[in-house]
Amino acid sequence: MKALINDQYDRIVELCETVDLPVYRWHGDAPASGKAQVLRAPAGLLLITPESLEALFIRHSERTRQIFGGLRYVVIDELHSFIGTERGAQLQSLLHRVELSAGRRVPRIALSATLGDLTTAAGYLRPGEAADAAVVASAEPGGEIRLQVRGYLEPPPASRTNATAAHADSPTTGPDGDEPADRAAIANHLFRVLRDTDNLVFANSRAAVEVYADMLSQRAARVGVRTQFLAHHGSLSKETREHVEERLKDPATPVTAICTSTLELGIDIGSVDSVAQIGAPPTVAGLRQRLGRSGRRAGRPAILRIYVAEPELAPGISPTDTLRAELFQCVAMVHLLTTGWYEPPDTAGLHLSTLIQQILAVTAQSGGATAGELYPMLCGHGPFRRIDQSTFARLLRDLGRHDLIRQHDRGLLLPGGEGDRLINHYSFYVSFRTSQDYRLIADGYTLGTLPVDRPILPGASLIFSGARWRVVSVDTGSRIIELTAADAGRPPVFPGTGGEIADEVRRTMRRVYRSTTVPAYLDATARTLIAQGRAAFHAAGHATQRIFARGPETLLFPWRGDRIMNTLTVVLAGRGLQTGQDGLAISVANRSPADVHDLIRELAADTLPDPIALARTVPAKAHDKYDRYLSDELLDAAYAARALDVPGTWATLAELAATGEGAG
């Protein structure tokens, strides 16, 4: 978001100069002079993040009426990135508070290129009034897309070096080039086709960004080309990220940025010639956003290369690995992209964690508020409309029990000791969970920050910002890691997971398995892999069966999205089964397919259970930033809304019950 605002600021300033309209930006890294001008004389156009808007309300509460009194419009860019998220719930609340400060309704406008459900989007933009929203959709045909999906084989674990086998996802890269064969082959092809142009290479994790930035930089150094391969992700310093963004806009030297979703949004990074995606994209909508970074010059096609590595067929390989699932996921997502389908936003969540933040924010902003004032502001007429009065009362009692709020005279609620501590910490304005980071410093220059969940000791090697380092010292008090240049390195371990796979993606994957069509955009290896996957699919009986034996355990293949897979796992575990998820499959230990099939038929014939009762059986439910302050009762309700799909699961159980068992 910061990169997007900086980019938009530069372009909008140029547009607005001719009409004498001032433009300001407000985020954590923006100059203080512009913020001061907004506070003194609000006018013109303000580009701001939700977090900075939250900070403005709390730090300058006495000026909000003046600041928003003349507000004419609110524009939300990249709307799809907010719907159904904690950050999106915070933004809805902030927009409501803006209107309360302004004393009137302010027209809201939203922009997005990847919305499949415009009714849900309209409901997010103005809760309860979706029917009144006007939709302006482009009728322009899409441009030409040139696509290739390239397949690679991962070597079996026994053939890897000790260092590589120990960290298959984060291999050590040393001076002798001990790179896994699949990654080396991907890096070689990327280097060959990208070395003379400007490109974006998307990886699905910060660790993968560092791996490929290092591998490509080493190749450029060995050959002596002037092309730069630069890393870009959220843990790098502001200066490093902005340097990469500026280099991409400079036509003097070819630059390829290896990045996460930080460059996925609508930032204008110049004339990017092509986009690459390493691994299956996290979502169809994300793939559309990434593809949209290329082909922006008139008459030039958008070019997308997707690189997928599947394990070699070797003794002991998992049955799910023989299906080549990642490649089929890619093919399914490309098909859905070309038909204009995108993941529907998740609007089922209660967002109790963000409601806690908003209760604290409003009491801090207003100098206190009663429950009778907070409920209609945030829930009754606000964005948390799914929260009824009894749930809100239970939440307030939880906050009081943890000293987040205290009740004073005439029912006035004020932040308690713990609440004050949270509000006064810089991380309060962010609604989502953040980690405690260490600053990485080399020669007095801050490279960025690193979430340290495991000990890092002096002498350890590290890859960061696309370069290799050795840890000189670790200061736990100041949370600083000193680095020096080195010949070898290992990418750090970053927390986080990929996107949730939707039902339609898995359904489409199964249709691709059953089809005989070979997409023309697959290279020779990918064509071999898809043939292997289809052969394994039919040989095992997946075309007609969903339940299979594998040694002492049974595998279920529901062909459903992650939400239903999770609910099925919870339901079966609640019946005393030892369950786990293995990619496309749910494993059940020490039960025969017949036993599991009988239980599934029994469950399918039963009435639908209460989702909250199911949630009670899950041991670890805390997920969002302030979930630790919720009682078990509210934590169950939040988990059920966020992670369970009981109707979809019971429909899936009926399908599973109607099929027989395979021999495995």
Image (cartoon, rainbow, N blue to C red):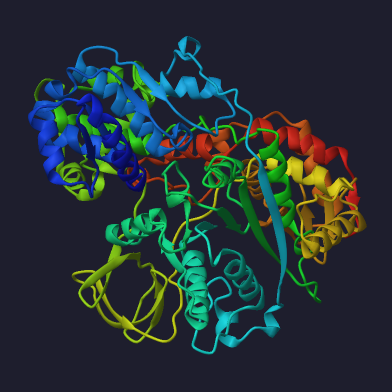
Q: Is residue 29 positioned above or below 487 on the image?
A: above
* Drawn side of residue 539 relative to residue 125, left or right: right
- Whether residue 398 is visible here, answered yes or no, is no
| Residue 179 can be seen, yes or no | yes
Quadrant for the C terminus in the image: bottom right
Q: In the rendered view, does 238 fall on the left or right side of 198?
A: left
- Residue 194 is left or right of residue 35, and the answer is right
- Which quadrant, please, contains the N terminus? top left
Judge by depth and name the residue closer to the eye, 380 or 128: 128
- Callout count: 0
Q: Residue furthest bottom?
A: 176
Q: Position of residue 19 (x, y in %)?
A: 23, 24
> Which quadrant holds residue 11?
top left
Tell me if residue 10 comes above or below residue 277 in the rendering: above
Taking 310 as reference, is 53 above or below it?
A: above
Residue at coordinates 21% horizontally, 26% vertically from top-left? 21
**Residue 252 spot, x, y in % from top left:** 40, 61
Asked if residue 491 lies left or right of residue 192, the reply is left
Task: Give 512 or 183, whichever is nearer the viewer.
Answer: 183
Picture coordinates of residue 534, whole percent (x, y) = 86, 55
x, y (%) of residue 522? Answer: 77, 56
Q: In front here: 129 or 530?
A: 530
